[in-house]
Image (cartoon, coloured by chain):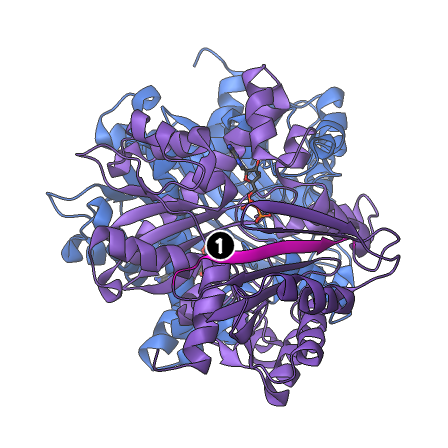
Chain colours: A purple, B blue
Amino acid sequence: SRVLVLNSGSSSLKFALLDPHSGEQYLSGIGEALGGPEPLLTWKSPGQKHSRQLDSGAAHGVVIDLLVRDLLAGSQPAAGNLIAVGHRVVHGGEQFAHSVVIDQKVIDAIAECAALAPLHNPPGLLGIHAAINAFPEIPQVAVFDTAFHQTLPRHAYLYALPYALYRDQRIRRYGMHGSSHRFVCERAAELLRKPLRELNIISAHLGNGASVTAVRNGQSVDTSMGLTPMEGLVMGTRCGDIDPGLLLHLGDALGFSLEKISSLLNRESGLLGISQLSNDCRELESAAADGHEGAKLALEIFCYRLAKYIAAYTVPLQRVDAVVFTGGIGENSIFVREQVLHQLRHLGFHVDAKHNESIRFGAEGRITAADSAVALVIPTNEEWVIARDAAALVRPGE
Amino acid sequence: SRVLVLNSGSSSLKFALLDPHSGEQYLSGIGEALGGPEPLLTWKSPGQKHSRQLDSGAAHGVVIDLLVRDLLAGSQPAAGNLIAVGHRVVHGGEQFAHSVVIDQKVIDAIAECAALAPLHNPPGLLGIHAAINAFPEIPQVAVFDTAFHQTLPRHAYLYALPYALYRDQRIRRYGMHGSSHRFVCERAAELLRKPLRELNIISAHLGNGASVTAVRNGQSVDTSMGLTPMEGLVMGTRCGDIDPGLLLHLGDALGFSLEKISSLLNRESGLLGISQLSNDCRELESAAADGHEGAKLALEIFCYRLAKYIAAYTVPLQRVDAVVFTGGIGENSIFVREQVLHQLRHLGFHVDAKHNESIRFGAEGRITAADSAVALVIPTNEEWVIARDAAALVRPGE
Ligand SMILES: Nc1ncnc2c1ncn2[C@@H]1O[C@H](COP(=O)(O)OP(=O)(O)O)[C@@H](O)[C@H]1O
Ligand SMILES: Nc1ncnc2c1ncn2[C@@H]1O[C@H](COP(=O)(O)OP(=O)(O)O)[C@@H](O)[C@H]1O
């Protein structure tokens, strides 16, 4: 059996066709610049890469139609027996602590949550509607980025704001990257041979967006992203934690509009903002090696802030079975992992340089010395989480 | 010899006359509701309390005139030999890493820093001008709340923002409560019998405003307040850390103006906002004991966030000689100290219940068990720091 996984952004649509049991991908790709003058579709099937220019203005529906008519048809028989379409939905608010089969009530609830994620939920709904049109007979499943964090206790999810903002406006910490944190958590339990319900880890998802989560007894108990994906760690172009008074200062003293502040903090900050060079960790590492001061500084701040979060999350956990690195940076950056663990040496972490250098590019395993507290690298696989959840919901017994 | 210490707020002026060597106070008081219809002056000299209604509209100058004509004159001969006036100035920007004797250049520089602290520096200048008028012959000294934190390394003071905001607008972490953190730091060195330059502590100043500072080798290396006093811990009415995206959400989705957001986050948040009851820790503790849910929640969040900061600050310190509690809450709250240290038990902290219960109301000492990591209570004394600095600058040899 196969599940088609869809991940819709405002101008992009990622898709993957996979076996929910093995995780094997038969087809994957992305439609980019959708709605613009030159939309582009690129995809790969095992051993082959393809790309196709789409008509000007082509949007999510066009990509899905092509998927159905050409791509899936062309992948037969591998694509046979599609049992579900799984959708990544960014914000499930407090309504969704688990994945669900999509019906009208679910669609309405996702639309309601759009008030909390105006940039992210509307494109998710676009994808859902297009997929319902294209596959009217096949069950659609929603998998929420926030769901894994619905186990946070009150003292971790409430901000120190007037309580009415939570009660009436649902303003609280929700957290994101839930599927990724859940994936590495389940995998860490296997690697450490511990029942998930006894597992305490701190998982660092370090991609363009980045978040760190404290998992106690298999459940998320704190996480660095908040109401929105702006809070927490330094990211590619997002600022992460800043003084709230700083935003007011940008408005008051410098006369910036909210719109300007938003684009500044979302798109011009983070690694890019500090380095004035790039949002890309790999580029920064090579520039830093060549002596670029901004690149060095950006990496230094990134690592210092991550190390502080990990140390802070020892508070809700008390006992940490492992720190887990994932996402593009976590899976590949020798430098970041080494720096962060070095700053945590007082907590018993000592990198094994050989393992740290060899575990990259999709490899998995332990990067700390034998007598050290444990740090693992686990390549994340959000598509697989989505496909598994979808399959479990539509074929419960399997 | 005596130093007069002045601390000017926008509508208040605190003053104290003290011996810079012993710290003994001969006179202290506060003018409140200055500039309003019913300004009030209250003061005490050893053994006596006084208060006096001032004329409608009376401001900082009137208080200082009364100080000179009535109060100081009435305190003779104890008040004799005034060698300096010491001013608390909130924001010294990057210009001031130490206290200085005030001249026109210093006044200009403080005025420049007012762009960074529009609520705080202008009243400080009011007090300075009034004092120069009243005591034209006596040296005036400025002591900055930010100065102690000028030793922060770049990776701790830079936000992950476009670098130009730092280079051109001086937007960075400055930190506050510097005199208090410095005071407890020097005292901790004495209590622990360590040279200051080898002392590593985490000092928590918990008053209506609250901040926590990591001190390595006697120098501040990280601190929770930022560009403004809004960042960091939960405070009486300030929110501390929140998602920057949350502010944008308040503006975008809820249509709040910057002014409304500012007053919400500065005056209606923190302990008051969560509890919907009070900004006062003592009141919250007694309400929580009576089962008030909001009060319990506010205290829980306050303690959890503080414990996380302390754990995070083990990263820059690696070795922590002591955690130090100060400020009204730190000096007095059995509950907060017990809760916070309990959450840090994985780092070796174990409260000694008897000592925790007895060290309050101005007492000083260790509140952890013999085999525990060390936590100290040290009553802060910002006036004394200011008086000492002033005396040291105007009478260097003494
Ligand atoms: N070999 C590498 N060394 C360091 N960083 C890497 C390496 N490979 C990828 N990265 C970084 O991973 C980040 C992208 O992570 P990824 O998880 O793919 O992003 P997204 O959040 O968009 O899914 C980029 O900063 C990239 O530079
Ligand atoms: N006995 C006490 N128990 C708990 N909290 C106390 C106690 N005494 C004072 N506090 C708290 O100290 C805080 C005021 O601290 P203080 O340092 O005086 O404030 P400020 O920052 O205005 O100087 C208030 O929250 C008050 O409730």
Residue B38 visible somewhere in the drawing: no
Find out if the beta carbon at label 1 lies less than 8 Å from the nearest ligand 1 atom. Answer: no
A199, above or below B278, in the image:
above
Residue A282, percent from left and from top: 56, 30
With A127 as the anchor, is B71 left or right in this view?
left
Q: Residue at x 76, y 39 (%)?
A: B115
The kind of secondary structure element at disc 1 is loop
Q: Horizontal and vertical percent for residue B138?
A: 64, 24
Residue at numbered disc 1: A224
Identify which residue is drawn at 41% across, 39% down: A307
Question: Is B136 or B350 nearer to us in this picture?
Answer: B350
Relative to the observer, which residue lies in front, B335 or A205? A205
In magenta, the rendered stretch is A22-33
In the image, residue A24 lies in the stretch drawn in magenta: yes
Q: Is residue A95 magenta?
A: no
Badge count = 1
Quadrant in the picture for residue B334? bottom left
**Above or below — where is A4 with respect to B85?**
below
| Mark 1 crowd level (few <14, some 14–19, many ≥20, 10 Å Cα) | many
